Amino acid sequence: MNGGQDLGGVQGFGPVEPEPNEPVFHADWEKRAFALTLAMAMPGEWNIDMSRFARENRPPVEYLSMSYYQIWFAALETMVKERDLVADDEIVVGHALNAPKPVKRVLTPDDVLKVLHRGGPTERDTNTQAAFKMGDKVRAKNINPPTHTRLPRYVRGRAGTIERVIGFHVFPDSNAQGAGENTQWLYTVRFDGPELWGEGTDPNVKVSVDAWESYLEPT
Amino acid sequence: MAHDHDHHDHHHDHSELTETQLRVRALESVLTEKGYVDPAALDLLIETYEKKVGPRNGARVVAKAWADPAYRARLVKDATTAIGELGYAGRQGEHIVALENTPQRHNMVVCTLCSCYPWPVLGLPPVWYKSAPYRSRAVADPRGVLADFGFALPKDTEIRVWDSTAEIRYLVIPMRPAGTDGWSEERLASLVTRDSMIGTGLPKSPKDVAK
């Protein structure tokens, strides 16, 4: 979606302000929101692409006025409510009022390190051939889906070069909608600065995105 | 709005709690009471990312790459496997690619769409990495961003920006500082900063770490 999350090239935010000796978390609630988000992936009620869509799917002004853990937490609230795991009135009183919905699994302390170490690889086996090879000239399609996509606006319609054939990966646009993995070849596509930002911009800047095959067309 | 929290048995002063704090606390209570989360697992997740997984992991990888050419070759060919040799793997680092800085080319990593970051080697991202100023400008004006971090590169150095739009996570291998011949991996690791592995900084020099 063309939402507040798609920030590449947006202007006016001012300088980057690194915080010296920054702590991992800035408040106790950030720790809890972080851990709840990770732990609630375990029941299998949603996938990572659905989580990302739940985070970005809000008015841009809201997205941009929230801290990152506020965004994570808001998305978690949305998802537990959408899946009927938690009801509004339960959040209001801060207690369970209804019987829990059965879920596939719950993260136990014994499993934490194992689950983190395993992660969630997105590469799949295939016997298909990649349509593009290293060095091929391609163009990112001009698409504007209102649903989740990982093709940022600033490369849409722009011409680039295949720098790397990465592998055969789960397609988030489909997975985020619960429409299956629709696994595709994934490429690193490199763009020249002036192609993205116009004449006169620094020719020694090159920017790449990782793009699924259906985002691309030959030029 | 969550407001009725007098019955909570937490020991903080409620008058100081923000709306967000109250909502997080309320949801955690509900999820725990319904058996969807185990608070001990939450504590362990927090402890892991607060104390164990962080940029010291990545510094070990970089230092080993500096000291051991065979390891560096493996890292550049298949970073996920080479990093796994040191025991670092998993969530948000399932597919890692290592990017070598050279005198001709400086690599810089961003996630314009969210906050993708190689957790097993760098830990959780700093706030600035997830912030609008960095995400918006890293791809359009990377030299300006580097200036915000207090350094400049020669105009003819290529700046190569990697936008992490898929599940590939990028780790920058900065150039080994001069004056470190014969240093042990452990000593080299002390020069490797988090920002140098994102591409928004350079490693420390031997002078920086000298007493």
Image (cartoon, coloured by chain):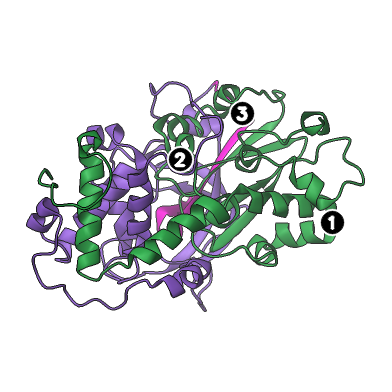
Chain colours: A purple, B green
Determine whether label 2 and label 1 are within 8 Å by CB.
no
Q: Which residue is mark 2?
A: A158
Determine whether label 3 and label 2 are within 8 Å by CB.
no
How far is the residue under mark 1 from the one under mark 3?
A: 32 Å
Label for residue B69? 1
Front: mark 2 or 1: 1
Image location of residue A193, percent across then percent down: 55, 32
Looking at the rendered structure, the kind of residue marked 1 is Pro
Q: Which residue is mark 3?
A: A203
In magenta stretch: residue A202: yes
Image location of residue A218, percent across then percent down: 48, 53
For marks 3 and 2, the one nearer the N-term is 2
Image location of residue A162, percent across then percent down: 57, 52
Which segment is the magenta one?
A200-219
Along the line of sight, which residue is nearer the eye, A168 or B98? B98
Badge 3: chain ID:
A
Image location of residue A33, percent across then percent down: 32, 51
Category of crowding for the residue at label 3, using alpha-carbon neighbours closer than 10 angstroms: few (below 14), some (14–19), many (at least 20): some
